[in-house]
Image (cartoon, helix red, strand yellow):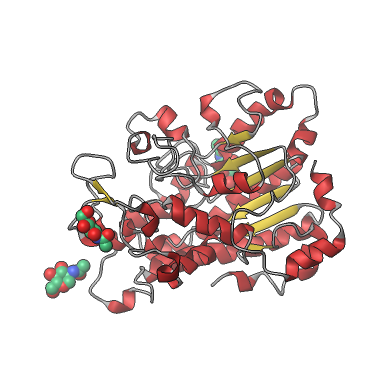
Amino acid sequence: MDSSKLSVPVVILFLASVVPLISCDTVAPLCCFSRIFSFGDSNTDSGNNCLVNSACGANRLPYGETYFHKPSGRNSDGRIIVDFIAQAYGIPFQPPSKGGSTAEYFKDGANFAVAASQALNNSAFKKLTNMNPWNTDSLSTQLQSLKNLLPTISQGSSVSAVMASSLFVVGEIGGVDYIIGLANKKPMDEIRSWVPSVVDAIISALNDLISLGATTLIVPGNYMFGCSPWFLLIYQSNNTADYDNFGCIKSVNELSAYHNTMLMEELAKLRLLHPLINIVYADYYGAQSQLYLNAQTLGFAAPLYACCGVAGQPYNMSLRIGCGSSGSQVCPDPSKYVSWDGDHLTEAASHQIANGILYGPYSFPPFLQTAQTAKQELGSGVRQYLK
Ligand SMILES: *[C@@H]1O[C@H](CO)[C@@H](O)[C@H](O)[C@H]1NC(C)=O
Ligand SMILES: *[C@@H]1O[C@H](CO)[C@@H](O)[C@H](O)[C@H]1NC(C)=O
Ligand SMILES: *[C@@H]1O[C@H](CO)[C@@H](O)[C@H](O)[C@H]1NC(C)=O
């Protein structure tokens, strides 16, 4: 299936790279994959954590209220970014990998993301940070789950044919590795020193997928997690110099941007090694920055407040009382908020970010460009996508 993508006439590819694509989701599917496999943490999890952890918050209302009208195991009021990517490609949502085992269950692919997953495996994380990981499903564990499933999914056809006709969304992942350090108030310099290892773990997963036959991989960078109410509370300060012009925690966003810069550099090297593979960097950070920059126009009336949290607290957020537990309230209109529960995005914010990478300028190379075109633009284009 992917070969049809590569044979799109050059003139269309040229136009796609020059004419800004319109920012809406009524555009025809971006063509053509049989299924999607995604990996990541709570921002991408479509229910895995709730299948194995009965204390998870995302299996109770108001989680899911906006789109599914019931909890779906997603850490949002509705759809998450990978859902919007699936819809853009005309593919049904990916079920959580832990929820089934048949070829039928996985006909549209699988979502391997688990809340609280790190990019680094547990032993590497412990060794590097001297702290305990939050979860056993690191990126390499998620990858192993895919490998275990491939014989079931490919039934009859070859594994490499299945890989080649699939779209891979590898991330966002790595945020948790840093967040564990931030939550434990580790010095920022120490946390920044972990970035090369975290990026290496992501690159190693991409290499694995490519050697199994993957041909198109979307690799998201990190979010502006310095804007999430959770960090706004933890890093609350009387010093205005600690905040950026959006009112977010500067040092935390700088950590995220540092990770993204290094990830982009390593992706550029990977593209040179694999010139025929589509490796797309998805700039979640850049797309998210537009939500704060254009908050009024986009209708985000309270961009730094939690929609679901505790009224009267700063940012209507409490570190003790989670969304959905007693003592929490939910806002009447989640579409006016970027943050759903103080720690994860609303459906409205996810939708805007997905549009920014699918139809806007927040992916490199832009969607629908061939690997060959991407190769020519390397060097000049990579950095401009990071704000
Ligand atoms: C964990 O990751 C490190 C570094 O990437 C690697 O050397 C090691 O083999 C991995 N360990 C396990 C148990 O997968
Ligand atoms: C800010 O200043 C006030 C008054 O000096 C103090 O009580 C408060 O603890 C300070 N808050 C932080 C986060 O430093
Ligand atoms: C904070 O919560 C209260 C109670 O739900 C609500 O009235 C108020 O509008 C909220 N503030 C913002 C900025 O969302």
Q: Is residue 237 found left or right of 226 in the rendered image?
A: left
Q: Position of residue 102 (x, y in %)?
A: 62, 20
**Where's the N terminus, which quadrant?**
top right
Q: Residue at x 60, y 50 (%)?
A: 202
Quarter for ligand 2? bottom left
* Residue displayed at 37% across by 38% down: 58
Residue 7 as seen in the image, left or right of residue 92: right
Name, please, the residue furthest toward the front.
26
Q: Is residue 137 above or below residue 105?
A: below
- The answer to whether residue 98 is above or below residue 358 is above
- Answer with the quarter of the image where residue 188 lies: bottom left
Residue 175 percent location from the top left of the image: 47, 53
Residue nearest the viewer, comparing 264 with 335: 335
218 is higher (above) or lower (below) than 53:
below
The residue drawn where x is 53% and y is 64% is 287
Q: Quadrant of residue 274?
A: bottom right
Q: Position of residue 267 (x, y in %)?
A: 67, 59
Residue at x 45% of width, y 72% of height:
293
